[in-house]
Amino acid sequence: MIIIASQRGGAAKLAAHLLNHRDNDHVELFEVSGFLSDTLDGALQEARAQSMGTRCDQYLFSVSLNPPETEKVDISVFEQAISRIEERMHLQDQPRVIVFHEKEGRRHAHCVWSRIDTKEMKAVNLPFYKNRLMEISKEIHLEQGWKLPAGLIDREQQNPLNFTRAQWEHAKRLDDDPRLIKAALKECWAVSDSQKAFESALEQRGYMLAKGDRRGFVAVDWRGEVYSLSKWLDVKTKALKERLGDPAQLQTIADTIAQTDKRLVERMQSFTAEIRQTSRARLEPLLEQKSRMKTRHRDERQNLADTQKQRWRQESADRQARLNKGFRGLWDRLTGQHSRTRDQNEREAWQALVRDKQQRGSLIQRQLEERQALQRNITHVRHERNNEIEHLKTMIFSALPPEMKARLQEQFKQRQARRNTPSQRPGHDYNLSM
């Protein structure tokens, strides 16, 4: 499993994150040990209070344990991983909390230790913890027979800068035949008798009229290429001015390119909006099914918990009834029957705990499989949406020169950053990075 860790403070924020039911299908506080409080927030606040007697600001060590998406992982595997982390990081005697999250059909765990050693009143040192956790992760993958992620096989494979040129290369610019460009510009000139008519003809061909750097007339195509009209039309500047007027009244090349970029970005945004709308319509019934499934799964778990609790009370009462009182109880003690009955009760109580744990594990596994099946459908729709947008980007950007491509990509990033602002689109699920 992939293990990610950090030293941190912020007990209240971390507790809120770990108990976040909105973004997770299920949240289970699995264990609170070593603290006086039996609640998550109370335990982390204890660690914060203890840290006030030290100089330690990062008084918590928070670890997330994420198994492979396709594997069925028993709780014991998580527990073994946590025990190894404690041993390697010398946290065996430190208080801890364990929380399980389930989201999109996957289950992962969070474990948080207090770093404050209350005997020494100082924080436990955690040198090279990232390297040590990576070794533990590799060991677990090998022991469980899981496929090693590329980053665990070769550390350098995590760095995108190690990708080959072929992996980064995009489609090349589509070069136009100069003869066709000249013919198109001359046709626009021939069919127009005024500036307005010439601009309209140029626009139909993908060009815009602009003022050149030397006060001449130029045409700017949709990719930002500039064409001097006196040269490409073989027309003198005087004739151009007679039909088109004063070039000083036109936009500059820079302004024209900016306007073209804006129109292309808006066009691209309209295309992606159509794709998102189609994807949203396909996702809506799946997300409704996900919501109903989430509620049903929680009810099933609560019903099982209530049933087990009631059964435990009844079985505990039955076991207690076996222990005689009064004279018969005294006689049982003298003959050893009391001890044998007590041992039998302890065995049955342990067997009952194991049984309940197995029942809960079976229920969780069945629910995970059901949730994973739904998630595959959701993921398929999202992948198709992303593939459509990627194809659209490739189709449009393949025809752009590098400098224009860079400009447009930067504009897309800025627009997407504004689009994804949480205050504008809270909890939205359909934003796509362009």
Image (cartoon, rainbow, N blue to C red):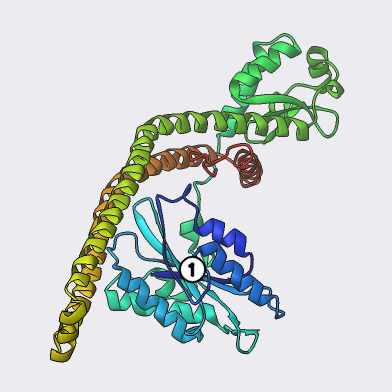
Q: Position of residue 350 (x, y in %)?
A: 23, 74
**Quadrant location, the C terminus:** top right
Taking 214 as reference, is 432 above or below it?
Answer: below
**Picture quarter containing residue 263?**
top right
Q: Work out whether residue 268 or residue 99 is closer to the camera in this orientation and state it.
A: 99
Q: Describe residue 187's horizontal placement relative to residue 135 as left or right.
A: right
Q: Identify which residue, 267 or 57, lies in the foreground.
A: 57
- Count of numbered circles in the view: 1
Q: Position of residue 199 (x, y in %)?
A: 70, 17
**Quick check: 236 left or right of 121?**
right
Q: Position of residue 34 (x, y in %)?
A: 49, 77
Res 9 quadrant in image = bottom right
Point out the image quarter for the N terminus. bottom left
According to the picture, the residue beneath numbered tag 1 turns out to be 158
Asked if residue 337 can be seen in this view, the reply is: yes
Question: x, y percentage for residue 146?
Answer: 29, 70
Is any atom of residue 380 visible in this view? no
Tell me the kind of residue under disc 1.
Gln
Up the image or down, 383 lies above or below 189; here it is below
The secondary structure type at the circle numbered 1 is helix
Q: Residues within 10 Å of mark 1 (few under 14, many from 20)?
A: some
